[in-house]
Amino acid sequence: MTFDQDLDACDLLCPLPVLKARKRLQSLQSGQILRVQATDPAAVIDIPHFCSEQGHELLASDTDSHPQLYWIKKG
């Protein structure tokens, strides 16, 4: 899947992957896609929750890969 920006949040623990994703999404235009790479086990719960609470769309995720990958469309 294509994306506009990439965020390497590997080796960061909760809540840092979500906080860094929030900051990076602020610089994107509505509809652009941010790919997040994360190794935090809590990201499986935190990132989808963050998207639903903030009005972003989680387009896809690959939680079986290392690192985990998430594609977030800015709302």
Image (spheres, rainbow, N blue to C red):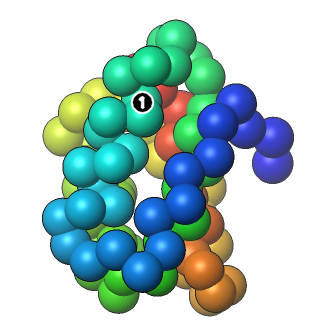
| Depicted 45 relative to depicted 4: above or below | below
Position in image of residue 35 (x %, y %):
61, 49
Position in image of residue 9 (x %, y %):
45, 64
Give the crowd class for mark 1: few <14, some 14-19, many >=20 residues within 10 Å: many
Provide the residue designation for mark 1: 25
Q: Can residue 59 be seen by looking at this rendering?
A: no
| Depicted 68 relative to depicted 29: above or below | below
**Residue at (60%, 80%) from the top-left corner?**
67
Left or right: where does residue 49 sit relative to residue 4?
left
Position in image of residue 25 (x %, y %):
42, 30
**Residue at (26%, 77%) from the top-left corner?**
13
Left or right: where does residue 3 sit relative to residue 54?
right
Q: Which amino acid lies under the numbered mark 1 shown in the image of this protein?
A: Leu
In front of the other: 11 or 65: 11
Left or right: where does residue 19 sit relative to residue 47?
left
Which image quadrant is residue 40 in? bottom left
